[in-house]
Amino acid sequence: MIDYTFYKHVMEFLVKYLGLENELLYMSVLRYNETVNGVKALVAIYRVNRGELITYCVVKFDNLAGKAEPTCSEDRKYVERIYEEMT
């Protein structure tokens, strides 16, 4: 189960990364797993007012390096493949 703090952290990070600070958005966490040095998440981001999908993103948070690696695309199969390849 994803806690609110993690959800908020991922959402804020991706909103800044995508340049969508002025939009009302909803994020759905599709998958989440721990990795060797952190966690990885596969999410879908939607515009609330239109209910439309903006993008899928996979993000790996590396606790040792103190960084996050995002990859976003409208192609769900592509981001799912990247998610599976992350260790």
Image (cartoon, grey):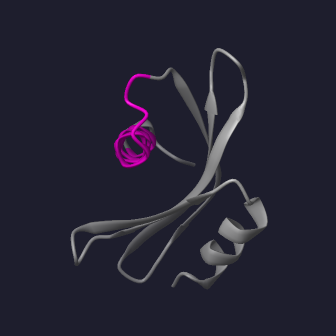
Check the image and report above or below for 47 versus 55: above
Residue 66 in which image quadrant: bottom left
> Closest to the observer: 50 or 67?
50
In screen coordinates, is 46 left or right of 15? right
Task: Name, please, the residue furthest toward the front.
Answer: 19
Q: Position of residue 34 (x, y in %)?
A: 49, 71
In screen coordinates, is 53 left or right of 5? right
Q: Position of residue 38 (x, y in %)?
A: 38, 72
> Closest to the observer: 64 or 17?
17
Check the image and report above or below for 42 versus 80: above
Q: Position of residue 26 (x, y in %)?
A: 58, 29
Check the image and report above or below for 1 versus 85: above
Q: Main secondary structure of the magenta part?
A: helix
Task: Name, please, the residue furthest toward the right.
Answer: 77
Residue 7 in which image quadrant: top left
Residue 25 in which image quadrant: top right
Q: Is residue 14 magenta?
A: yes
Q: Position of residue 20 (x, y in %)?
A: 43, 34
Residue depicted at 75% across the width and 60% down the height: 76
Residue depicted at 70% across the width and 76% down the height: 81
Numbered range of the magenta stretch: 6-22
The number of callouts visible is 0
Q: Is residue 72 magenta?
A: no
Residue depicted at 44% across the width and 40% down the height: 11
